[in-house]
Amino acid sequence: MWIVRKLLRTVRWIVILFLASSVLAVVAYKYVPVRLTPLMLIRCGQQVARGEKVRLRHHWVALEDISPYLAEAVMCTEDANFLKHHGFDFKQISLAYKEGKNGKRQRGASTISQQTAKNVFLWPRGSWVRKGFEAYFTVLIELIWGKRRIMEVYLNSIEMGDGIYGAEAVAQGNFGCEAKALSRPSCALIAVSLPSPLKRDSAHPSPSMLRRQTKVVGEMQWSERTGALGDLSIFGKQ
């Protein structure tokens, strides 16, 4: 029995240490720029394993130094209910489940909050264990960071091309400008590339990307007129 008690004590301390360290990490990242993510390290490792030169372009900038069109564009393509939900879009999750059950091509149901939690704290490969941690960190960042900080971290840390991470790096590398100078069409094109940034190059868009870009620009203009996405002023949008 003493072995069981010792094991339970060990497990309890592991859980306590994990909870304490994870909360401290989330609190720290509310104020400290996220300079490096697990995905960046993984990509660098993959490049080295292939015998390639390491490619890592990442420049953290404040949200006010990123075009507000970019936040609007990623909401149109990735998470239209970002300002309305509390981390999880249960309607999209339900639709994705039904489509998968019926054998249809399953849509992505991860919110911007979930993607941010995964990018900053976890590994990319999906599993039930990772999904559980993702849900935990999503709740934490929603409670501690708030929507503006979540969007700031998301736009600074997400993969936007081969070795390109964040708005400033993609703006300089693919559009020859600073992130704050990105136009509405450029932001729409970046957003279109996000589901598969290693295959969809915003610097050299395919005809299908350009068609999707036109549609996203129209969605952005419509949302601006109707307020469908919510109050975009928190991202600097007037």
Image: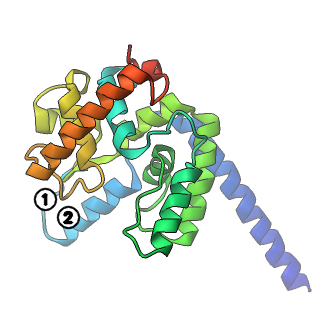
Residue at disc 2, secondary structure: helix
Residue that lies at the very extreme toward the right in this rendered image: 1
In the rendered image, residue 27, in percent from the top left (x then y), is placed at 60, 37
Q: CA distance from mark 1 to mark 2?
A: 7 Å
Which residue is rendered at x = 21% and y = 45% of the image?
212
Which residue is rendered at x = 10% and y = 43% of the image?
203
Asked if residue 206 can be seen in this view, the reply is no
Amino acid under disc 1: Lys
Q: Is residue 25 above or below residue 131?
A: above
Coloring scheme of the render? rainbow
Residue placed under numbered mark 1 in the picture: 53
Q: Earlier in the sequence, mark 1 or mark 2?
A: 2
For this view, does 193 lie left or right of residue 63? left
For this view, does 123 lie left or right of residue 66? right
Asked if residue 51 can be seen in this view, the reply is yes
In the rendered image, residue 137, in percent from the top left (x then y), is placed at 59, 50
- Image disc number at residue 47: 2
Which residue is rendered at x = 36% and y = 43% of the image?
157
- Contact, mark 1 vs mark 2 (Cβ under 8 Å): yes
For this view, does 68 lie left or right of residue 131? left
Residue that lies at the very extreme toward the top in this rendered image: 238
Residue at disc 1, secondary structure: loop
Query: 145 or 107: which is nearer to us?
Result: 107
In the rendered image, residue 151, in percent from the top left (x then y), is placed at 44, 34
Image quarter for residue 52?
bottom left
Q: Classify mark 2: residues with Cα within 10 Å, few (<14), some (14-19) or many (20+).
A: some
Amino acid under disc 2: Gln
Query: 215 or 183: which is nearer to us?
Result: 215
